[in-house]
Image: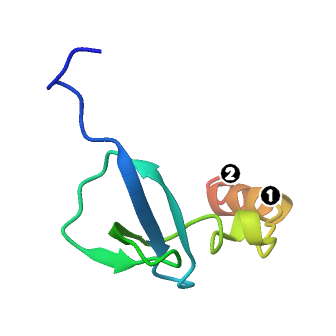
Amino acid sequence: MKPGIHPKYREVVFQDLTSGFAFLTRSTVESRETIAWEDGNEYPLIKVEISSHSHPFYTGKQAMTTTAGRVEKFKNRYARGK
């Protein structure tokens, strides 16, 4: 790799604002905030609105919608002119 052209790749803490869940990983994202992690070290903190810990698809709380009712509603709405 050429020196000086790549972003700094370092350990970063991502924190889910919805659930408070946080995890340590590596990233090139810049942040001015820091957080003290479980190992006693300070790491840059990236706050995210949603993660796999709070997303309905991953938590199993996803609402399943049926399209049958929507199709009938659409047909009824636009079949008035006939």
Q: Which residue is drawn at 36% across and 48% down?
A: 10
Disc count in the image? 2
Label 2, residues with CA under 10 Å away: few <14, some 14-19, many ≥20: few
**82 vs 17: above or below:** above
Secondary structure of the residue carrying tag 1 is loop
In the image: residue 68, left or right of residue 49: right
In the image: residue 32, left or right of residue 12: left
Locate residue 29, reporting x and y percent. Answer: 30, 51
Locate residue 22, reporting x and y percent. Answer: 53, 74
Locate residue 60, reporting x and y percent. Answer: 81, 71
Residue picked out by circle 2: 82
Q: Residue at x 73, y 63 (%)?
A: 57
Label 1, residues with CA under 10 Å away: few <14, some 14-19, many ≥20: few
Q: Which amino acid does label 2 sit on?
A: Lys
- The one nearer the camera, 79 or 13, is 13
Locate residue 21, reporting x and y percent. Answer: 57, 79
Instruction: Mark 1 vs mark 2: give the one in front.
Output: 1
Quadrant of the rendered structure where residue 75 is? bottom right
In the image: residue 10, left or right of residue 38: left
Of marks 1 and 2, which one's residue comes earlier in the chain?
Answer: 1
Residue 67, numbered circle: 1
**1 vs 27: above or below:** above
Tell me how the rendering is colored.
rainbow
